[in-house]
Image (cartoon, rainbow, N blue to C red):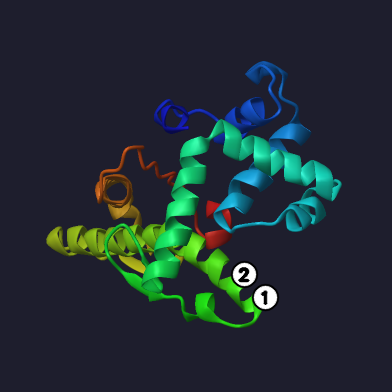
Amino acid sequence: MIEAFKCGADIHREVASKVFDKPLEEVTKEERTKAKAVNFGIVYGISDFGLAEQIHTSRKQAKEYIAQYLEKYSGIKDFMEKIDIDAKENGYVTTMFGRRRNIPELKSQNFMVRQFGSRAALNMPIQGTAADIMKMAMIEVNKKIEEKNQKSKIVLQVHDELLLEVPEEEKEEAIEILKNSMENVVKLSVPLTAEISSGETWNDCK
């Protein structure tokens, strides 16, 4: 999976090829969609029931998809199991940069509450690390803008997107600052890539 990211491959198509055990070029649009649901679902600790509901298949089939995914990507399974064990032992999980979230739900007497705690414990190191990186990128973008005495400014952050208000004469320089900051604020084992678009309105940027 790391190699797929490094090569800029379509990660959902790559996963579909592995899970459905067929050549990459034979993966259908429907299979890619299912693989995408599994990819994101795994991050949230999705159940076979939840996946079945999402991709409109049987619970048995959904369970097989999850099992095949974890078999093909055994490193992800090991990662998930380690997080679960550490969270139960420590009572908290952390992001890659050390930000901590306590998970008291893991000690609840209520099964459903404990299940929620397990999902939260699995999700936080991933989504939390992404949020950390985004905040670091925002600081870097703002710093570079101030260093160049630009009138450009960050006006909104939505998940992994930054929206800047930029005078036309600063557009090219702002694009360079934004792309370089978001792609290089941290170095991971896979590249961080940022897509830039511009327009008169936010809607035009989509």
Please tell me which residue is depicted at 47% across the width and 80% down the height of the picture: 104
Q: Residues within 10 Å of mark 2 (few under 14, many from 20)?
A: some
Identify the amino acid type marked 1.
Met
Give the SS element for disc 1.
helix
Horizontal side of residue 106 vs 168, given as left or right: right
Whole-percent x, y for residue 91 in the image = 40, 74
Tell me if label 1 and label 2 are in contact, CB under 8 Å.
yes
Q: Is residue 104 above or below residue 39?
A: below
**Disc assigned to residue 115:** 2
Question: 172 or 49: nearer the eye?
Answer: 49
Identify the amino acid type marked 2.
Gln
Q: Is residue 27 above or below residue 63?
A: above
Please tell me which residue is depicted at 54% across the width and 72% down the height of the picture: 117
Q: Is residue 130 above or below residue 180?
A: below
How far is the residue under mark 1 from the one under mark 2?
A: 5 Å
Question: Which residue in the structure is indicated by mark 1?
Answer: 112
Question: 69 or 134: nearer the eye?
Answer: 69
Q: Quadrant of residue 129?
A: bottom left
Q: Residues within 10 Å of mark 1 (few under 14, many from 20)?
A: few
Q: Quadrant of residue 53?
A: bottom right
Please tell me which residue is depicted at 59% across the width and 39% down the height of the picture: 70
